[in-house]
Image: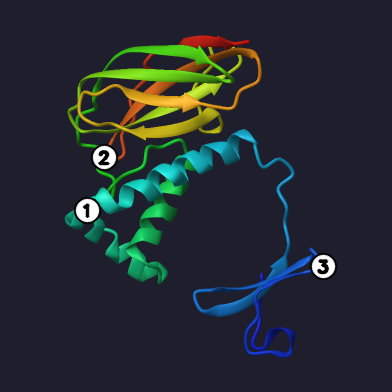
């Protein structure tokens, strides 16, 4: 990344030139960089990160004011907003296959939700995966993982979604669109302070 004072003969610039150079701003400072296009935007790692990003961004507004305030120190150090500090820190945790946390630091002292049976039901180019919750405790979400091979180990690069725990209501994820095949799923619960459970148990369904 190259910092600029007056890019493209102007005081400010944004956008790309000839699909090769991008001009933008970072923390109020203009810069230029090479345009990078992912070789595979549907890679396991990218799907996993999008799942984490979606869950975190949707949850911020419902996090208590007290927990939101715990991100202010990290935000001041990084010169970003508390929301951006929360998002960035939890995405780094995700890359290390650690559960996200509503507050900073993650203290891993809460009690995991108690999970019941899971199920997978095939539909038209889709599979509905359901994870039952028998006791909510401090459950925050359910992580859903997918493979086309049975007996797989859950990992960051086969994470496809995180869905919020709502008391003891079943947690449901609709996986779509899918090509005809047999798909295997496993789940883990997470707490709001950065814990994740062991694998709950594999379920599968076949799309024809």
Q: Is residue 110 left or right of residue 162?
A: left
Quarter of the figure with residue 7 = bottom right
Q: Secondary structure at mark 2?
A: loop
Of residues 158 and 177, the one drawn nearer to the viewer in this rendering: 177
Measured in 3D between alpha carbons, the distance from the residue under mark 2 to the one under mark 3, in whole angstroms, is 45 Å
Q: Secondary structure at mark 1?
A: helix
Residue 13 percent across, percent down from the top left: 65, 80
Q: Closer to the observer: label 3 or label 1? A: 3
**Which disc, if any, is residue 18?**
3
Q: Is residue 169 left or right of residue 149?
A: left
Q: Quadrant of the N terminus?
A: bottom right
Measured in 3D between alpha carbons, the distance from the residue under mark 3 to the one under mark 1, in whole angstroms, is 45 Å
From this viewpoint, which residue is outermost toward the front?
Answer: 124
Q: Residue at x 51, y 13 (%)?
A: 122
Which of the two discs, 3 and 1, labels the residue nearer the N terminus? 3
Q: Which residue bears the numbered disc 2? A: 192
Image height of 199 relative to 14, above or below: above
Q: Secondary structure at mark 3?
A: loop
Q: Are marks 2 and 1 in contact (CB under 8 Å)?
A: yes
Q: Which residue bears the numbered disc 1? A: 67
Image height of 148 relative to 14, above or below: above
Q: Residue at x 52, y 10 (%)?
A: 205
**Which disc, if any, is residue 188?**
none
Q: Is residue 187 left or right of residue 170?
A: right
Quarter of the figure with residue 76 = bottom left
Q: Residues within 10 Å of mark 3 (few under 14, many from 20)?
A: few
Q: Residue at x 64, y 87 (%)?
A: 5
């Amino acid at each position: 990344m190259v910092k600029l004072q007056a890019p493209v003969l102007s005081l400010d610039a944004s956008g790309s030139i000839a699909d090769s150079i991008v001009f933008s701003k970072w923390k109020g400072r203009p810069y230029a960089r090479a345009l990078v296009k992912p070789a595979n935007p549907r890679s396991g790692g990218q799907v996993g990160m999008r799942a984490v990003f979606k869950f975190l961004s949707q949850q911020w507004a419902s996090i208590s004011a007290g927990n939101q305030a715990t991100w202010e120190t990290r935000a001041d150090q990084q010169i970003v907003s508390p929301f951006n500090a929360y998002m960035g820190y939890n995405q780094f945790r995700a890359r290390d296959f650690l559960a996200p946390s509503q507050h900073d630091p993650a203290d891993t002292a809460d009690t995991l939700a108690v999970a019941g049976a899971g199920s997978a039901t095939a539909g038209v180019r889709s599979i509905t995966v359901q994870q039952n919750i028998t006791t909510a405790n401090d459950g925050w979400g359910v992580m859903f993982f997918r493979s086309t091979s049975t007996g797989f180990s859950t990992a960051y690069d086969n994470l496809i979604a995180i869905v919020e725990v709502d008391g003891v209501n079943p947690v449901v994820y609709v996986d779509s669109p899918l090509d005809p095949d047999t798909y295997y799923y496993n789940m883990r619960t997470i707490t709001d302070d950065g814990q994740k459970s062991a694998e709950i148990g594999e379920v599968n369904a076949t799309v024809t």
